[in-house]
Image (cartoon, helix red, strand yellow):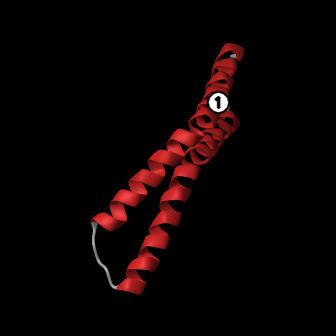
Amino acid sequence: MTPETVIELGQTAMKTTLLVAGPMLAAGMLVGLVISIFQAATHINEMTMTFVPKIVAVFVTLVLSLPWAISQLTRYTEGIFERIGAM
């Protein structure tokens, strides 16, 4: 295995990780931003107000994007197995 192959495998792994985790992270950031603006405007500093909506948003996003994420992870895993078989 050449160093270029290892670097390419690492890049592909990082890209797949970002693609799969991206929607959940974006949903959590967006909900957090909206809640923080609401809290700043109303001076309400309730801690549960920040965590519960973020958890719900991330969970809903996970459920909605799960088929796509599974297909991405399956494609990555098949690529890894094909590379192992080609060695």
Q: Please identify the quadrant where the N terminus is shown.
A: top right
Work out whether 60 lies above or below 54: above
Residue under the image location 48 percent in, 59 percent down: 28
**70 up-or-down from 65: above or below:** above
- Three-letter amino acid code of the residue under disc 1: Ser
Relative to 27, 72 lies left or right: right
* Outermost top residue: 85
- Tell me where residue 55 appears, x and y as whole percent: 39, 53
Labels in figure, total: 1
At 67% from the left and 31% from the top, the residue drawn is: 2
SS of the residue under disc 1: helix
Which sits in the foreground, 39 or 86?
39
**Residue 60, percent from left and from top:** 49, 46
> Residue drawn at (58%, 43%), measured in percent from left and top?
20
**34 is higher (above) or lower (below) than 44:** above
Q: Nearer the viewer, residue 74 or 82?
A: 74
Which residue is tagged 1? 71
Q: Name the spot of residue 82 as percent of width and height, x first.
A: 69, 19
The residue lying at 42 percent from left, 52 percent from top is 56
Quarter placement of the C terminus: top right
Q: Quadrant of residue 86?
A: top right
Question: Few, some or many C-alpha atoms within 10 Å of disc 1 (few <14, some 14-19, many ≥20)?
Answer: few
| Residue 47 rendering spot, x and y as whole percentages | 28, 68
Residue 49 lies in quadrant = bottom left
Vertical order, 41 against 60 (above or below) = below
Residue 39 figure quarter: bottom left
